[in-house]
């Protein structure tokens, strides 16, 4: 599936090259813009069908994804599985379930994310689910940029696993060369 997913990213213009600030705060010369990928309903449906095949064995009751970036992925994944979908939003800097979403005690949750680099947002959503009495049974993402290095303490599935070089801002060669960085992600939106 990795080759097919990368081809879909390239075909849809979702692989960006430049100087980017990732949600984690790290810098990179490559950005996987899932919003461009999910611009096309047929691509979203196909990818989420594959993701559903990977997580069906965990028998989830609900999908929970971090907003804003993974809302479409979580929605379409839940549709493929025939289960509810919720998304967590930042409220006063921390993820919360809003909009009337309620997680049932003991609910088996799959956390769905677009792109994982350090896994910070996913870990925050896992903490939220645990705090609310849910049980995270797996994490699934479209792209694992960590090269398989992130550990969430639960099974972890991805459609595409790549190892893209990232830099701390102080060690970023693009910053040192004077290249301006852009932040295409959604963290920090008001």
Image: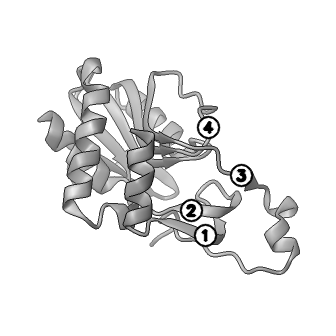
Query: For mark 1, does the 10 Å Cα neighbourhood hold few (<14), some (14 to 19), or many (20 or more) residues?
Result: few
Q: Which residue is mark 3?
A: 165
Above or below, 178 relative to 48: below
Residue at 80%, 71% in the rendered image: 174
Q: Which residue is mark 1?
A: 17
Using the numbered discs, state the Cα–Cα distance from disc 3 to disc 2 in whole angstroms.
Answer: 11 Å
Contact (Cβ within 8 Å) of mark 1 with mark 2: yes
Q: Position of residue 8 (x, y in %)?
A: 37, 56
> In front: 34, or 66?
34
Indicate which disc residue 147 carries. 4
Whichever of labels 3 and 2 marks the residue nearer the N terminus, that label is: 2
Q: Position of residue 28 (x, y in %)?
A: 68, 61
Quarter of the image with the N terminus is top left
Q: Can you tell which quarter of the image residue 41 is in?
A: bottom left
Using the numbered discs, state the Cα–Cα distance from disc 4 to disc 1 in whole angstroms.
Answer: 19 Å
Q: How is the image coloured?
A: one colour
Residue at 26%, 44% in the rendered image: 48
Q: Is residue 32 left or right of residue 113?
A: right
Whichever of labels 4 and 3 marks the residue nearer the N terminus, that label is: 4
Whichever of labels 4 and 1 marks the residue nearer the N terminus, that label is: 1
Using the numbered discs, state the Cα–Cα distance from disc 3 to disc 1 in whole angstroms.
Answer: 12 Å
Indicate which disc residue 39 carries. none
Q: Position of residue 75 (x, y in %)?
A: 22, 49
Quarter of the image with the C terminus is bottom left
Q: Answer whether residue 52 is visible to the viewer in this image.
A: yes
Q: Position of residue 110 (x, y in %)?
A: 33, 31
> In front: 7, or 66?
7
Using the numbered discs, state the Cα–Cα distance from disc 2 to disc 4 in whole angstroms.
Answer: 15 Å
Residue at 32%, 41% in the rendered image: 64
| Helix, strand or loop status at disc 1 | strand
């Amino acid at each position: 599936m990795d080759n097919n997913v990368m081809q879909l990213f390239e075909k849809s213009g979702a692989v960006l090259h430049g100087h980017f600030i990732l949600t984690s705060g790290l810098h990179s010369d490559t950005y996987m813009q899932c919003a461009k990928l999910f611009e096309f309903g047929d691509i979203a449906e196909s990818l989420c069908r594959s993701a559903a095949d990977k997580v069906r064995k965990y028998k989830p009751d609900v999908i929970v994804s971090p907003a804003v970036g993974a809302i479409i992925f979580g929605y379409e994944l839940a549709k493929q599985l025939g289960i509810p979908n919720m998304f967590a939003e930042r409220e006063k800097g921390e993820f919360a379930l809003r909009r009337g979403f309620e997680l049932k005690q003991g609910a088996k949750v799959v956390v769905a994310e677009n792109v994982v680099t350090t896994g910070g947002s996913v870990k925050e959503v896992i903490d939220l689910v645990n705090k609310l009495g849910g049980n995270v049974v797996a994490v699934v993402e479209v792209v694992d940029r960590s090269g398989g290095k992130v550990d969430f303490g639960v099974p972890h599935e991805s459609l595409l696993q790549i190892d893209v070089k990232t830099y701390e801002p102080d060690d970023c060669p693009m910053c040192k060369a004077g290249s301006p960085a852009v932040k295409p992600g959604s963290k920090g939106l008001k």
